[in-house]
Image: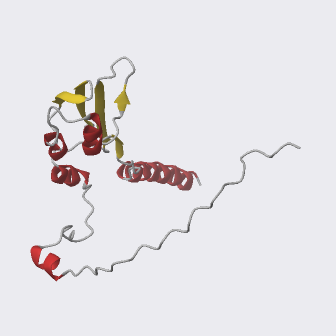
Amino acid sequence: MLVASSAGLVGCGSLDGVSNGIVGLVKPYKIDIVQGNFVSKEQAAALKPGISRAQVRDVLGTPLLTSIFHADRWDYVFTFQRQGLEPQSRKLSVFFKGDELQRVEADPMPSEADFVASLDSGRRFGQVPALEMSEESLKQLTVPTKQVEPKPLPPLPASYPPLEPTRP
């Protein structure tokens, strides 16, 4: 009986070591965290001194940070965290004088293609198709042109009812 219980305890100890080894191999999934406004090299190159605030907003989108103390400065901040890698952080600031862009201060920005490639986490789902049409495909594309005649609007009434009820 003593030999059987000793063998059982030794077996449990070795099983415990094996289970800890298996648990060490399995790691929980951690999602990629993308925060802020991604600004590509192409977008930053489109900013020229003298363009308006509206044009900057059209190119870059709404700024992540605006301050009432710095009304002539917009900040675009972007962070990207992935499991097992160092977090990436980029910042672009645009400065205005009145309504016109005066200058841009920015970290080195990746191109859109470089950024998309950095998002690839190693999963392979097959060949990614080209996302733009070739010249031949554009020539073969026929867009139906259907002219629609506008319908005439109904005539306006001669008089309108009063806005407030009349008092007797």
Residue sitting nearer the eye, 118 or 98: 98
Exactly how many numbered labels are in the figure? 0
Q: Left of 106 or right of it: where is 161?
A: right
For residue 85, say whether it is visible: no
Where residue 137 sits: x, y (%)? Answer: 15, 78
Residue 84 falls in image quadrant: top left
Residue sitting nearer the eye, 93 or 112: 93
Where residue 54 sits: x, y (%)? Answer: 29, 39
Outermost residue on the top side: it is 69
Name the residue at 49% across, 51% down: 12
Name the residue at 58% across, 62% down: 156
Where residue 114 sits: x, y (%)? Answer: 16, 50
Name the residue at 39% across, 20% down: 68
Residue sitting nearer the eye, 117 or 164: 164
For residue 153, say whether it is visible: yes
Q: Quadrant of the C terminus?
A: top right
The image shows residue 160, relative to residue 80, as above or below, that is below
Image color mode: secondary structure
Outermost residue on the right side: it is 168
Name the residue at 29% across, 23% down: 72
Q: Quadrant of the N terminus?
A: bottom right
Where residue 39 sits: x, y (%)? Answer: 24, 42
Outermost residue on the left side: it is 135
